[in-house]
Amino acid sequence: MSTRETIDLYYEYANAGDWSSWCDLFADKAVVDEQLAGRLEGQDTLREAVAGFPEMYRSFKNVPRHVVVDGDQAGVVSHLSAVTAGGEPIEAEVMNYFRLEGGRISYMANFHDTLPFRGPLGMEGR
C-alpha cells in the first residue's frame, strides 16, 4: 500500500468509527506522540487508547483539508468536529505528521489547539 493510500484509510477508518481497522494501519511497535494523551508506544497501547472512543464521543469526524506526501512521510492539515457523550461540541484545527515503514505507520505526531477539549473532556489547565 502506498503512503497516500494508508493516509487516506487512516481518516476513512477514523471517520467511520472503525477503530480496529484504524489500529491495523500502525506498525506493531509504532510510536504516537498525541498532544492530549502523551506518548503511546505499540499497536496494543493504541487499541486500548481508542477502545473508549465510542463511549467518549457521540460523533467524531476528522476531515483532511490539505495532504502532503513525500515518499514514506506525510503531513495532513485537517479539521476535527466531534460531540462528546455529554453533548458538548468540539471544533479544532489539527496537524498530523506521519512516517511509514513497509506501508504501515511507524511514527505519528499530532498537534492541535487544546482549548476546545478542555471543558468538554474535563481537561482544565492542560
Image (tube, rainbow, N blue to C red):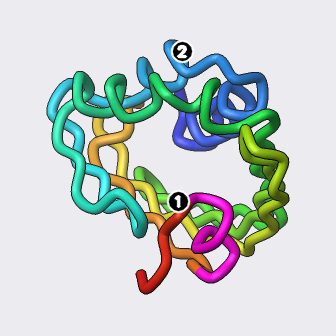
**Image vertical order of residue 91 relative to residue 71, above or below:** below
Q: In the rendered structure, are the residues bearing label 2 and label 1 in contact, judged by CB atoms less than 8 Å apart?
A: no
**Image vertical order of residue 91 relative to residue 39, above or below:** below
Give the crowd class for mark 1: few <14, some 14-19, many >=20 residues within 10 Å. some
Residue 22 x/y as whole percent: 53, 25
Q: Kindly identify the amino acid type of the residue bearing the numbered disc 1.
A: Ala
Which badge, 2 or 1, is on the more N-terminal residue? 2
Residue 74 x/y as whole percent: 52, 59
Residue 116: name its quadrant.
bottom right
Q: What's the residue at 27%, 29% (across, down)?
A: 27
Distance CA(mark 2)–CA(mark 1)? 19 Å
Q: What's the residue at 81%, 48% (across, down)?
A: 83
What segment is highlighted magenta in the picture? 115-121
Residue 112 x/y as whole percent: 58, 76
> In the figure, is residue 8 to the left or right of 55?
right
Residue 54 vs residue 4, the one in the foreground: 54
Q: What's the residue at 73%, 46% (across, down)?
A: 84
Disc number lying in front (2 or 1): 2
Image quarter in which the C terminus is found = bottom left
> In the figure, is residue 72 to the left or right of 81?
left
Q: What's the residue at 44%, 56% (across, down)?
A: 98
> In the figure, is residue 57 to the left or right of 39?
right
Mark number displayed over residue 74: 1
Residue 18 vs residue 125, the one in the foreground: 125
Mark 2 residue element:
helix
Residue 36: name its quadrant.
bottom left
Residue 86 x/y as whole percent: 75, 44
Mark number displayed over residue 13: none
**Image vertical order of residue 45 relative to residue 90, above or below:** above
**Residue indicated by mark 2:** 21
